[in-house]
Image (cartoon, grey):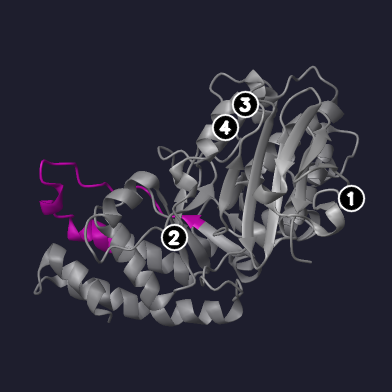
Amino acid sequence: MDTVVKELLESLYGVDRAPVQRIIELVEHYRPGIRSHRELFYEDSGMATGFPLNESDVVLLAGGELTPDALYRFLDEECDGTVSSVCGTGPADDFPQIAREYRLMVNLDPGVPRVADTPDTAAAVVDPAVMTEAVEGLLRNLASGAQIVRLPDTAPRGFFPLAQRILELVDPEALLVVDATTAGQESSAGEDAQPAHLTYQSDAPEVLMDAVGHGSTGALQEWAAGGRFADTAHIAFNGNMSAGRAAGADLVAGADLVAGTSGDNGYLDALVDPNLPDSQRARVYLAAQAAMLALAGVPGIGMSRFIGGVVSTEYQELADAVNNPETVTGIIFDGYKQLLSARTQSRAFHPTSAQRVLPSGADLFVLVRGPVSGESVLCIHNLSAEDADFEGSFSQVGRPEEGVFLDLISGDRVFPGQEAGGFSLTLSPWECLWLQLGGS
C-alpha cells in the first residue's frame, strides 16, 4: 500500500483505527478488477505530459433519455467516430458495453454529506463510514470500467487528495473531475495534495449566449483570457453541470440552460431567434459551438446540445431526427460532427495546449491554440450578423506555407489579403475558420 495513502488516512483516523485498515482492504480488493479492465482499453495520448486524453477526446453528457443499449447504438451508428467518451446517468456497471469501447465517465453518488465548515475545518473529522462508502464507490466504478469520475462538491472533506493518491496507485490513466473550489481548497491543504486532473467550469454556455445575444464579444474575450485557462495543473472540463442535482442528472451543457426558457429546443431557442429559417438558426448555433470547442481543455457536450433539440426516448425517432437534413436538428447534428472531426486534425487542440486570445473587434472571437509538435491553429469566429474583418500579424501567429491557410472545418484553402508583415480576412456572418499554421 502506498505510504502517502496510509498517511492521509492516519491523519484523519489515527494509526489504530479500523477505517484505515478497511479502506486499505478495499483498495487491494478492487485493484485486480481495475487492472483487468484497463488491459481491454488503453489508448496512449502520445503527449510528453502523459495526460491520457488528446485532441480527439470529447465527452458526450447523456441525460438519461436513452437506455444504455440505445445509447450505445446511437454512439455506434450515428456519431461516425466523433465521440470518444460518454457520461451516463448511473453507475459504471449499467454501461458494460460502452465501457469496453468508449471512455466512460460517471458521477460519483453525491449523497454523502460534506462535513460542515467550522472555524477550524482542518480539525473536522469525517465520519469513517462516510469516507469508506465514498472510497468504495470510487473503486467499484473504476473496476466496472469508469475512466473518468466526477467528484461531487458534497464529497467528504479530505476525499479529493485521497482519491488522487488511490488513482495514482491503482489506475494512473483514470481522471477525476472536480469543481474549482474543491480543487483550490484541497490542493492548498498540504504539500501532498495533487492538482485536479480536470476542473469543470459551467459558465461557457452563458458567456457565449451573452456574446451572441448582445452582439459583442468583449466579455467573452475577457473571460477566455482569464487565468482559468492559463493553469495547466487544472485543465478545464468545459461542460455545464449543476451540483445540486442527483448523480447523473446534472444540468448538462445546453440542456434547459436558461430559467424560464420555453419551447422544445431549450438552449437553441434561448440562443437563436426561433423565427429565423432553420438553416440560419443552425449557422448561428454552430458558430457559438465552434467557439466553445476551440477553448483549451476537454469539451463536455450535452445530448440536447449535440443535436440542438429534445432527445427522444425512442431510438428510431431520434435517429430519424438527426438524419433528416431538412430540419434544424439534422443540420446541427451534421455540423457538430464536422466540427468535432476538424478538432481531431491538429495536435494544437490537445487539452494541455496553450491558448492565446487575440484582440479583435466586438464581432469577432479569436484564439490561437498551440504550438504543439510544431502545430498551431488560428481560430476566428464571427459571432455577428454582419461581415467582419480581421487583421492579423504573422509575428503573432506565424506564417503559413506559401502564404495560404488551410481551414480545418471546411477543408478549403484560404487566401488572405497580405500586406507588409500582416494579413487580412473578411468573414461572412456567423462564419468560423480554424486555420492551420504549422505541421502537416
* Among numbered discs 4 and 1, the one appearing first in the sequence: 4
Q: CA distance from mark 2 to mark 1?
A: 36 Å
Say above or below: 172 vs 135: below
- Residue range corresponding to the magenta coloring: 106-133
Select label 2 or label 4 by which is in front.
4
Q: Which residue is mark 3?
A: 211
Q: Nearer the viewer, residue 418 or 242?
A: 418
The residue under the point 67% across, 28% down is 361
Q: Disc 2 versus disc 4: distance between alpha carbons? A: 25 Å
Q: Residues within 10 Å of mark 3 (few under 14, many from 20)?
A: many
Task: Say which residue appears at 46% left-offset and 79% top-offset.
Answer: 33
109 magenta-colored: yes
Relative placement, left or right, of 294 versus 415 is left
- Proximity of marks 4 and 3: CB atoms separated by less than 8 Å: yes
Pointer 1: what residue?
Answer: 412
Q: CA distance from mark 4 to mark 3?
A: 6 Å
Secondary structure of the residue carrying tag 2 is loop
In this figure, which residue is indicated by the disc labeled 2?
Answer: 197
- Check disc 4 and give the amino acid type: Leu
Q: Residues within 10 Å of mark 1 (few under 14, many from 20)?
A: few
